[in-house]
Amino acid sequence: MSEFRVALTFDAEHPDRPAAFSNADRLLDELDRLDVSGTFFVQGRWAEAFPATARRIVDGGHLVGNHSHYHARMPLLTADGLATDVADAEGAIREHLGVDPRPWFRCPFGSAADHPVVVERLTALGYREVGWHIDPQDWEPTNSPEGVVRAVVDGALARGDGTVVLDHTWPDQTVVAIPIIVGRLRDAGATLVRLDALPELPGPGRVAAPQVVGNR
Ligand SMILES: [Zn+2]
């Protein structure tokens, strides 16, 4: 049977919508229980605010990337502003998680998709911008857990080996959806892996997000 690897990735950041305070910890509990390793793109200010939870990402064996410090739209920053923001996040991640997030970077809102200058600047700072194949819009308050499950499972089955999934650590529906997603994907023969186990990753040239609202 051919390989079917799926990488669950989570943006760990301050919510911009109402969400239960404990969701990131509950999500980490579920991943532990299911023995799943994933990838977390950590916002620097979130790591500063929740250092104990942030540390659990490393203790759980997950891969850590950088999701900026202030969660600003990278194309709006000057070169110096971008470098400062990225370095601030990197410093917070080193301090609170004890790891170097390089080379993994994900732009807030996926906003590097159409901005090669941002990608160039990130590259100069030692980063590789990583996108996704499947966006279940788990942050959308009207999206049900079952909607998130369907989008991820159907999308991964359609795309096959090497699928990268975008999720977030804070939405209520994500915490409910993840165990169901893991069960269904494993039933379909999938292995859940970190991004560094995949030979090819979706880069900034991926299909751009259809709208600019939302918390990616
Ligand atoms: Zn984000």
Image (cartoon, rainbow, N blue to C red):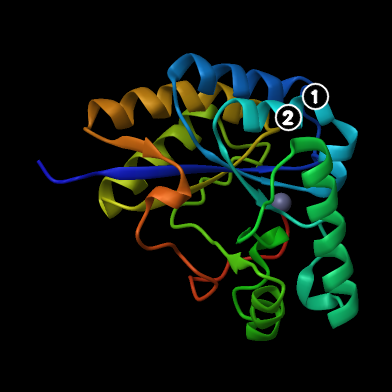
Identify the amino acid type marked 2.
Arg
Q: Which residue occupies the foreground of this view, 202 or 145? A: 202
Query: What whole-number distance in Å separates the C-alpha atoms at marks 1 and 2?
Result: 5 Å
Furthest-left residue in view?
1
Q: Which residue occupies the foreground of this view, 102 or 201? A: 102
Furthest-bottom residue in view?
117
Image-based side of 50 in relation to 211, left or right: right
Check residue 55 in the rendering and tell me which mark sits there, or answer none: 2
* Figure quadrant of residue 186: top left
Placement of the N terminus among the 4 image quadrants: top left
Which residue occupies 56% across, 71% down?
Answer: 208
Identify the amino acid type marked 1.
Ala
Check residue 52 in the rendering and tell me which mark sits there, or answer none: 1
Q: Which residue occupies the foreground of this view, 110 or 88? A: 88
Where does residue 122 sit, x and y in percent of width and height?
A: 69, 73
Task: Tell me the SS state at disc 1.
Answer: helix
* Figure quadrant of residue 157: top left
- Dot 2: few (<14), some (14–19), or many (≥20) neighbours within 10 Å? some
Q: Is residue 78 visible?
A: no
Which residue occupies 76% across, 19% down?
Answer: 22
Q: Is residue 87 visible?
A: yes
Where does residue 78 sit, x and y in percent of width and height?
A: 87, 81
